[in-house]
Image (spheres, rainbow, N blue to C red):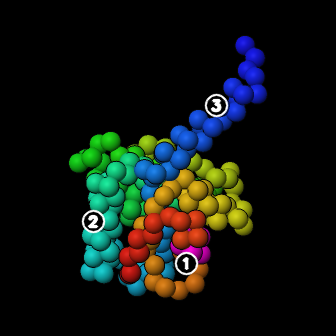
Amino acid sequence: MKLGKKAIFNIVKECEEIDEMLKNITLCFTGHRSQKLPWRFNECDERCVNMRNKAKEKIEQAIIDGYVYFISGMALGFDMICAEIVLELKKKYPHIKLVCAIPCKTQDELWTNEYKKRYKNLLKQADTIRYIAEEYTKTCMLERNDYMLKNSSRVIALFNGLSGGTKSTILKAEKMGLVVDIIKP
């Protein structure tokens, strides 16, 4: 069966409408990696525990607000912590979904065995995994961030005010009209 131009146009329009509906119930995370945080890799530090509690409150409020899809870039630090929180909240809200947007398949290549194990455990529990690139490139991290923003309407960010990838992601999100909730470390 061959479709006419009008039918194809209508199908494309329907797909765009569906994409917009999904975007309106999708939230992503951006934040500093562990080495840039005051507590570094010590997640038992009181400041990290407080940040985790604030993130959990914001994620749960987003669920109450109707958000279903939560995209994590799965970097060490805030991204992985938020992925863990989403999985924890999934026990209470089984309808929510964890989407892992990974810049490249070799993202964890230089990590310690402990973090590799944690990362792979999270990936096993994810509802969707989206790899941006096969191998690392100079732009794969930025492309991952763009993918997350393009498919979200809200962002929860851990931001210390300094220049870097998190700041540029927040600025881009605001320019795109996304709601940005900032947590200070």
* Quadrant where the image shows the C terminus: bottom left
Amino acid marked by disc 2: Glu
The residue located at (60%, 50%) in the rendering is: 131
Q: How many marks?
A: 3
Which mark identifies residue 11? 3
Res. 9 image quadrant: top right
Is 97 drawn above or below residue 36 in the view shown?
above
Q: Nearer the viewer, mark 1 or mark 3?
A: 3
**Residue position marked by numbered label 1 in the rendering:** 167
Q: Looking at the picture, tell me which residue is in the foreground, 117 or 134.
A: 134
Residues in magenta, as a range: 168-173
> Alpha-carbon neighbours of circle 3 within 10 Å: few (<14), some, or many (≥20)?
few
Is 13 drawn above or below residue 60 in the view shown?
above
How far from the left and from the top, in percent, is residue 54?
Answer: 29, 71
Q: Secondary structure at mark 1?
A: helix
Q: Looking at the picture, tell me which residue is in the foreground, 124 or 94.
A: 94
What is the chief secondary structure element of the magenta stretch? helix
